Image (cartoon, rainbow, N blue to C red):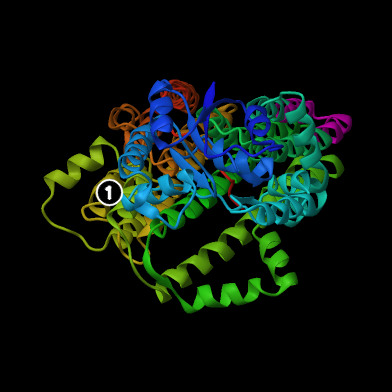
Amino acid sequence: MSTAILTGQPVPGSSIEDDLRSLGFDVRIAADAADTETLLAQVPGGLRVAVVDARFVGHVHALRLGLTDPRFPLAAIPGAVTAQPAGRQALTRAVARENSAGGGTAVAVDSLADRIVTALAADGTDVHRPELGSLVAEVPADPQARNEARQSVAAVDDEAVRLKSAVKARDGFFTTYCVSPYSRYIARWCARRGLTPNQVTTASLITALIAAGCAATGTRGGFIAAGLLLIASFVLDCTDGQLARYSLQYSTLGAWLDATFDRAKEYAYYAGLALGAARGGDDVWALALGAMVLQTCRHVVDFSFNEANHDATANTSPTAALSDKLDSVGWTVWVRRMIVLPIGERWAMIAILTAATTPRITFYALLIGCAFAAVYTTAGRVLRSLTRKATRTDRAAQALADLADNGPLASLVARATRARLGSPLLVALAGTAVLTVALFSGVTWAPVVGAVVYTVTAGQALYRPLKGALDWLVPPLFRAAEYGTVLVLAAKADVNGALPAAFGLVGAVAYHHYDTVYRIRGNAGASPAWLVRAIAGHEGRTLIVVVLAAVLTASQFTVALTVLAVAVALVVLVESIRFWVSAGAPAVHDEGEPA
């Protein structure tokens, strides 16, 4: 159990002890800094501990935000400071300093908790301070100030603020107006019954898989049920994040589930639609795989651009200024959010078209909509990158290199060749262009030659840090090249099972790439080097696939793709599960991508 140490003069009638206990704290009383230091030493190092001023007046949710969020080693609000095990050493030093100084380090600050925060800041220690908005959190200096603080607490509805803050500040139109108005209450209902975000996330996945199963029946009734269940799955998908924010239940396992299940649900549904169409005599597997490739590449564009500019300095551009200006006009905000076809709009469109039309029409609409959104967002980001003056950091360059997913062959080429062919983006473009031409040349062994050239350029593209204005486009180019190669060769095989096998292979590799993204976001580094070597890197997998297509018959190629898909899936899933359930995984909660 977490421990809260109350310091200072107790106030008759104060609810602070009950409030802390309601948040799961074991409350202990300290008379002064020396007593606080003694009690702090008695708390086991593996437990959270908080120091709270006994005169604190504020909302319970302010205490919850300040003292229970698992994502931050140290956090504070006025009159209270908390430390998780990772922050205990810094907190102990600060308390010891205050004890030895007799409170003289900050004479103007009467609260020991606030003096501790000041001491932590003096040490250069990062302390998270949550945004409280209209919530009250203060340590009144006299009875009159206490009276005024209590009136301020009474004037603000703590629960209404908590419900509002459970919803993401930036969401799509469909989510904001058609889901969140009631899903937040579902989240509260779940919280009051002890349900966790992970349980809701799992329920959302199961619902989506059932929806995919209904779509796979190929009947009109199955399609209608699939559309309804897909919407229900999305409602639960919104609810899990809102529940996490409502109750501050962030976890390593939750980060992994939330990060991967959205894609698993959507791509499983694509497969269900393709199976349903096949039952009706219509083969749309190429469209399903194309939709997955396009959507995954859109996400890689998002991830790469964001990582490239995560900590860029002097990050300004006329394009960004225009975007900010448009965001100040209400209707343009919603139009711009809708045309990028975020997950809410996309799933609503898929659900409606599934129920009312055919899988082929659904995929056509999805491909057209996603292609337009991809062009719009990528063009805007290219303009921003070309017009901004920014110095990108080593961290950003390393993140892009990790997202590129170069394997052992590309690394060998980079070490073995001394000649440098040009800028990373131009080299990557050249290699991708050669591979594309080779795939459509009609010559049996041309794709193998193209893949060899692609391997060489992959090694050359990363010979220097990716700090150019447009170098963030290198990872998306590699994703499009690898996934596109699998799609084209499976389609050219023209035998039953080739495209479904390709769908499975791209799905397994895409999972690896998403897993890498969320490790980077959690500041846990990229996937381990042995894993990248084991699954050959993007250039190695591309070369393997084109060689298999060249030397095997169409039926044998289908079997080989299936075996490769199963092998990659097993390796990446086992390592991913090991990482995300381990103690070393980051306790983060992804807020979700607009796309």
Disc 1 residue type? Val
| Placement of 584 over or under 173, stated as above or below | above
- Please provide percent x and percent y for residue 57: 65, 46
| As drawn, 221 above or below 424 | above
Q: Which residue is mark 1?
A: 453
Q: Residue visible at 46% across and 56% down? A: 306
Counting from the top left corner in percent of width and height, residue 59 is at 69, 45
Membership of 214 in magenta stretch: yes
Is 11 left or right of 518, judged from the image as shown?
Answer: right
Q: Within 10 Å of the Cα at label 1, are there few (<14), some (14-19), or many (20+) other Cα atoms?
A: some
First to last magenta residue range: 207-226
| Circle 1 SS class | helix
Asked if 170 appears above or below 88 in the picture, the reply is below
Q: Nearer the viewer, residue 217 or 251?
A: 251
Q: Is residue 217 magenta?
A: yes
Horizontal and vertical percent position of residue 405: 35, 41
In the image, residue 447 lies at what x, y percent?
Answer: 36, 44
Magenta span: chief secondary structure: helix
